[in-house]
Image (tube, rainbow, N blue to C red):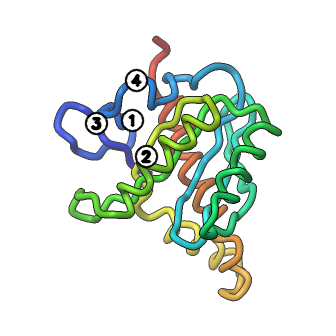
Amino acid sequence: MQERSRENGDVSAAEPDTRRPADERPEPRGGGPGPLLGIDPGTRRIGVAISDAGRTIALPLEVIERGKDDAWVRRIAELAGERGVAGVVVGLPVRMDGSEGPEAAEARRLAGTLRERLGVPAVLVDERFTSVAANRAMASADVDSRRRRPVVDKVAAAILLQSHLDALRSRPPE
């Protein structure tokens, strides 16, 4: 997982996307104590992962079908409330050339919606290759493709969130 740096827009593994205002990003150690929720947004399904309270490990949690109504937003809010999350990490689908398309604009809207509805900070992180990594990991574990489809999104969300947790831990304390 890679994240963007503020200075030049280049992608690096250790620096978060600081181009967004501070209220859109969890603090370096999160927006307060508690777990973080990872979101891998898609047009049909949304993968959700959760970290432990110590923010050491990310675990796949759920795949939510994205319907025409906002039931999926309510479900994310329920999951966040049940687990006392302190922040949300939303995957930002950046193109290979670094540009952003309509999917990225939708991810930014989703982060804003979740920040508003949940009352916790939200950070956007580059999600390139998370679904590929999830599929490869499951394939190497001999999970056949029919059984991968229903879970790949939550595994991708866990990979996204774990990458963010690792980047947070690699930074020196402030």
Q: Give the amino acid at mark 4.
A: Ala
SS state under label 3: loop
Which badge, 1 or 2, comes first in the chain's sequence? Answer: 1
Extreme residue in the left direction: 8
Query: Residue 134 appears in which quarter of the rendering?
Result: bottom right
Which badge, 2 or 4, comes first in the chain's sequence? Answer: 4
Name the residue that disc number 3 marks: 5
SS state under label 2: strand
Q: Give the amino acid at mark 3.
A: Ser
Alpha carbon of mark 2 to alpha carbon of mark 4: how far? 14 Å
Alpha carbon of mark 4 to alpha carbon of mark 3: how far? 14 Å
Checking the image for residue 125, the label placed there is: 2
In this rendering, which labeled residue sits more in front, label 2 or label 4? 4
Alpha carbon of mark 1 to alpha carbon of mark 2: how far? 7 Å
Callout 3 crowding tier (Cα within 10 Å): few <14, some 14–19, many ≥20? some
Left or right: 135 with respect to 35? left
Alpha carbon of mark 3 to alpha carbon of mark 2: how far? 11 Å
52, 141: nearer the viewer:
52
Alpha carbon of mark 4 to alpha carbon of mark 1: how far? 12 Å
Query: Do the numbered discs 2 and 4 sit on residues whose CB atoms are within 8 Å?
Result: no
Residue at 63% in and 79% down: 139
Placement of 136 over or under 12, stated as above or below: below
154, 54: nearer the viewer:
154
Left or right: 90 with respect to 150? left
Query: Residue 40 appears in which quarter of the rendering?
Result: bottom right
Extreme residue in the top direction: 174
Left or right: 115 with respect to 76? left
Callout 4 crowding tier (Cα within 10 Å): few <14, some 14–19, many ≥20? few
Left or right: 127 with respect to 155? left
In the rendering, at what x and y percent does residue 61 appear? 75, 55
Name the residue that disc number 1 marks: 16
Name the residue that disc number 4 marks: 22
